[in-house]
Amino acid sequence: MKKFIALILAMLMVLALCACGTTAAPAEKGNEPAASEPSGSEDAAVETVELKLGHPLAPTSSQHIYLQKWADLVYEQSNGKYKITIYPSSQFGEARELVESLSMGVYDLAWCDTAVMDFLVPEINLINMPFFFDSYEQLWTALDGAAGAELAKDIEEGANIHPLTFFSLGARQIFSNREPVTSLESIKNLKFRVPELDLWINTFKTLGMNPTPVAWSELYNALATGVVDGGCANWEYISQQKFYSEAPYILESNHFFQCGVPSFNLDFWNSLSEEDQQMFTDTCAQVAAEQRKDVQDKDADYKAAVIADGATVTPMSEFADTEEVYKRYSEGLWKDIVAAADADDLYQIMLEATGRA
């Protein structure tokens, strides 16, 4: 019996040893699953480039609203690679300061008002020539075509700035408190508010007015107190600032079509890939077209509101001395501006674009 029990115990020990021998060995290191390693098909995280764009206009302006739309579109089209933050109300400086800072590379991106760029790019004054463009259509035909391409070269060479597509700042209209503006005689010797800029002073001297420098912020009071008898502004400001309540006679002169343009420092622009340059160019062109239409639509609304409130508006087509006005400028101030900028080639392109050649 004792032998039988010993035999049973021996058999149990053998079975236990066999069971221990069948325990699974640890997997070799080379066969371990690599779940924590990134798949080769996954994209690396995109690093966002932060860009800041300052401008001097109000956050309620059409220009600010559409610059923000452009920033949003850039972020979307670049898949988050570029994020543009818009800073209105001169947070980064006044209009001229922005141009100068962008030129020197203080900023990579900024708003450039064409009215203040002539200290670096005298050719820019050709698009500010009074009474040169008859309509928005003429203006955009020139700036979106050969004239704009030539001007862009001048801006790059003179200012170290690469402009994108021009936005609209509206067209200026003449207003007076003396009588309806229907002829040169009706504005002769009119005390007319101007900034202290030669282009403006010479523009209104040519019309026989008496240009009187007054700060923009003081214009309404100057009209009310008789310091000046007239001035000019776009339809938005004529309506919103109530200039027509003191000077109710308005000539729809469109003598200055004002523009601004989102622009890059040229060195930064040249550091971008062609793909990114095209993305910025295309998105800006898309938004600028929408912004231009917005300004024109609002022009019509502001004009209608001013007329409804009692102002008298004379279209340029009903101004008695239109031919004399064009003659004075084409034989005088336009030639002076072109000569000062040494820009005969650009002038010829612009004449062709507007059908004046």
Image (cartoon, rainbow, N blue to C red):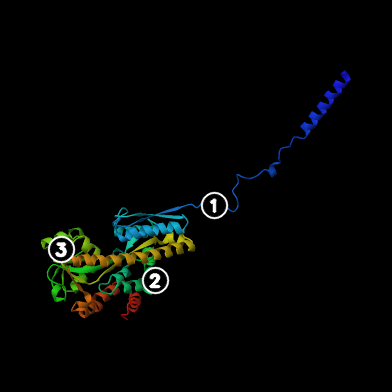
The answer to whether residue 316 is seen in the rendering is yes
Q: CA distance from mark 2 to mark 1?
A: 38 Å
Q: Secondary structure at mark 1?
A: loop
Taking 34 as reference, is 139 left or right?
A: left
Q: Residues within 10 Å of mark 2 (few under 14, many from 20)?
A: some
Between the C-alphas of marks 1 and 3, the distance is 61 Å
Quadrant hosting residue 205: bottom left
The residue drawn where x is 67% and y is 43% is: 32
Q: CA distance from mark 2 to mark 3?
A: 42 Å
Mark toward the viewer: 2 or 3: 3
For marks 1 and 3 on the same chain, the one whose residue lies earlier in the sequence: 1
Please identify the quadrant where the C terminus is shown: bottom left
Which residue is more in the foreground, 335 or 189? 189
Question: Residue 96: horizontal and vertical position, in percent?
Answer: 30, 60
In front: 263, or 294? 294
Can see residue 118?
A: no
N-term-proximal mark, 2 vs 1:
1
What residue did someone put label 1 on? 44
Residue 316, position as x, y percentages in the image: 22, 75
The residue sitting at the front extreme is 1
The residue pinned by badge 3 equals: 245
Residue receiving disc 2: 149
